[in-house]
Amino acid sequence: MKPRVAMFAFTCCEGCGLAVIECENELLDVLNLIDLVEWREGLSEKAEEYDIALVEGSISTHADEKKIKEIREKAKVLVAIGACATTGGLNALKNRYGMHEVKQMVYGKAGEQFDTIPARPLRAVVPVDLELHGCPIDRTEFLRVVRDVALGKTPKLPDYPLCVECKKKENVCVFFRGMTCMGPVVRAGCGAICPTFGDGCEGCRGLVSNPNENAHKETLAEHGLTVTEVLQHFDMFNSYTEDHLA
């Protein structure tokens, strides 16, 4: 039997789901290996049973928390997809404020009726078997990972700095253009798409397991920058910390 796969979305823009839809013809090949039983963006059906859960979005309400625990109980394999699910993403920016203040800022007097808690990546709430990074996810990487998981293989995901991919593409380092970049300490796997097209990396794929922070500081110093000046860029996708939950 083909493994039953369900896709779910929590607090996010569902851009990763759109990236999957854009796989188009390639997605048909994957469907030969799996039985897609639930996916709000692509199916009207609901499923009570599934083997693999692909989940995007951060957990930012009590209802989210309850639902992800139910999904974890049912799924043999749970894959977090996208920055919101793996690092907390943009949603975690609200964690630096009190939740009452956040509701007032966004909704005004009507804010008290909304359920909100500090935003967390999936792994902060339930055990996660695999994390697929990016904002949005890389389509080629997604297809490869789903194939591997469906066939019972362990996917190989990059855990080296983005600078490696930049050098392979012979890109001119954006630091020499007076820009900032998180490339020395963040995870590769996107093909260095932002630096390739003239933008600095803002770290949507999260930190590598053992970031060389000293090397990054040296690079910043060489270009007259400080860690404080760069942190505001890094915080866009990596502001989540358990300290905010205390």
Image (spheres, rainbow, N blue to C red):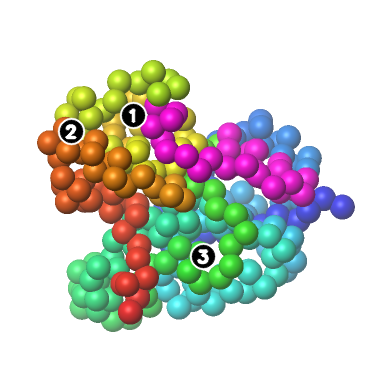
Q: In the structure shown, which secondary structural element does the residue marked by tag 1 occupy?
A: helix
Q: CA distance from mark 3 to mark 2?
A: 36 Å
Determine the residue located farthest toward the left in the rendered image.
Answer: 224
Contact between marks 3 and 1 (CB within 8 A): the answer is: no
Q: Looking at the image, which is closer to me, 28 or 118?
A: 118
- Residue tagged by mark 3? 123
Identify the residue shown where x is 35% and y is 21%.
171
Spatial distance from mark 3 to mark 1, Cα to Cα? 29 Å
Indicate the position of residue 164 as horizontal and vertical percent values. 43, 30
In the image, taking residue 21 as reference, residue 214 lies left or right, namely: left
Q: Which residues are magenta?
A: 140-166
In the drawing, does residue 103 fall left or right of residue 47? left
Marks 2 and 1, how far apart at CA: 19 Å
Which residue is disc 1 drawn over? 195
Viewer-nearest of discs 3 and 2: 2
Q: Residue at x 33, y 79 (%)?
A: 246
> At which x and y percent is residue 203?
36, 45
Q: Position of residue 142 (x, y in %)?
A: 59, 41
Q: Which residue is mark 2?
A: 222
Q: Residues within 10 Å of mark 2 (few under 14, many from 20)?
A: few
